[in-house]
Image: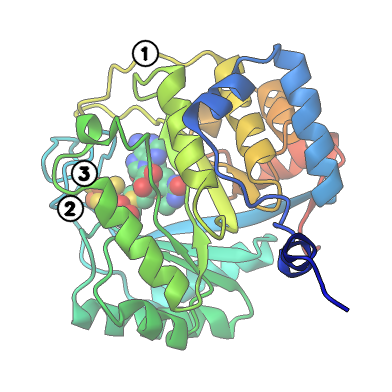
Amino acid sequence: MTVSPIALRRKVERKPHPTARYWKKCDVEALFAQPFLDLVYQAAEIHRAHFNPREIQLSTLISIKTGGCPEDCAYCPQSAHHNTGLEQEKILDVDEIIEKARIAQSRGASRFCMGAAWRGPKPKDVEAVGKIISAVKGLGLETCGTFGILEDGMAEDLKAAGLDYYNHNLDTDPEYYNDIIHTRLHEDRMDTLGKVRHAGLKVCCGGIVGMNEGRAERAGLIASLANLDPQPESVPINQLVKVEGTPLADAEDLDWTEFVRTIAVARITMPDSFVRLSAGRTEMPEAMQAMCFLAGANSIFYGDKLLTTENPDEDGDRLLMAKLDLLPLGA
Ligand code: SAM
Ligand code: DTB
Ligand code: SF4
């Protein structure tokens, strides 16, 4: 029997994964432009089709090396280019970090995220954080690290030490990147993300809104995240924490609906990813946070400190989750 070339092509064509599509910035802008409640409703439907909407993943952050960073990120209190009054610290002692990890675990966190104010680690830093990662992993927690730009082989070393996730944010629209950071390129971030994936680490990659960008730039950020292939397992959406002494200290407030829209659009374009309602929650009323959970956020930073700034405390968050009948993932 002869098979026509068209039939043959049909036979060998693989059905694309439903999420594997290229998101044009204008398509993401069109999502943003929907009537607010239609957008939230659509995001909620997608959330319910892909996740148990009652479960919230809890990650606790720790800054293992604070301040004095050579990069000039306009949002960041830890940049040596800005005078924020933050004391530069050496890398914390392993015992101190393990003690904090134990406490986080006992309060219900499933992941411990360790951050360092480096442009990127040196080989001796990878060795030092490797020991810390192995010890945290030994407690039974998931591990996440955010140490900046990685050189060849470093991601593999971190994976071998027991690292589960690497956080490396795209932060803003590639077209707005140079307005915010001048000491590295968007391409440098993409290069490290490639290394992280190649080493078999899970990717945590998100960004910040409220940096005087427009809706087009928010759409550009979400498109650049959604077009990562494969998409990140975890997508932190941060609202800028305005810190005195940084160039963005007086950035214009973003209307709360615009933040919720950003969460909803992240959920629609990245249906299988955990979308984290990240920095900025101390400024967010409970009802706004509830709206974010409805729009598809299913992860938070849990614990009264982010890296250097405040976050709602665990008791308050547990109460909020109880009011909303939400459960910690893995509880
Ligand atoms: N130095 C590493 C890097 O930049 O990848 C790791 C630490 S850095 C502080 C991690 C992330 O924190 C940044 O990518 C940014 O998204 C977020 N961040 C920093 N300052 C922030 C602020 N003031 N408000 C919200 N998010 C912030
Ligand atoms: C992420 O996207 N947000 C976190 C974590 N990843 C490392 C950091 C937020 C930092 C907020 C400012 C501070 O506390 O220094
Ligand atoms: Fe350094 Fe990261 Fe802060 Fe940028 S965001 S200044 S790279 S610590």
Say what amino acid the circle numbered 1 marks. Glu
The N terminus - image quarter: bottom right
Identify the residue at image location x=25%, y=26%.
244
Which residue is label 1 attached to?
Answer: 252
Is tag 2's residue or tag 1's residue first in the polypeptide sequence? Answer: 2
Image location (x, y in percent) of residue 254: 47, 16
Image location (x, y in percent) of residue 103: 58, 66
- Tell me which corner region of the image, top left, top right, bottom left or bottom right, holds residue 196: bottom left
Is tag 3's residue or tag 2's residue first in the polypeptide sequence? Answer: 2
Say what amino acid the circle numbered 3 marks. Leu
The C terminus - image quarter: bottom right
Which residue is label 2 attached to?
Answer: 69
Gap in angstroms between the C-alphas marked 2 and 1 = 25 Å
Gap in angstroms between the C-alphas marked 3 and 2 = 11 Å
Which residue is label 3 attached to?
Answer: 86
- Would the CB of label 2 be found within 8 Å of ligand 3? yes
Kindly state the secondary structure of the residue where label 1 is placed. Answer: loop
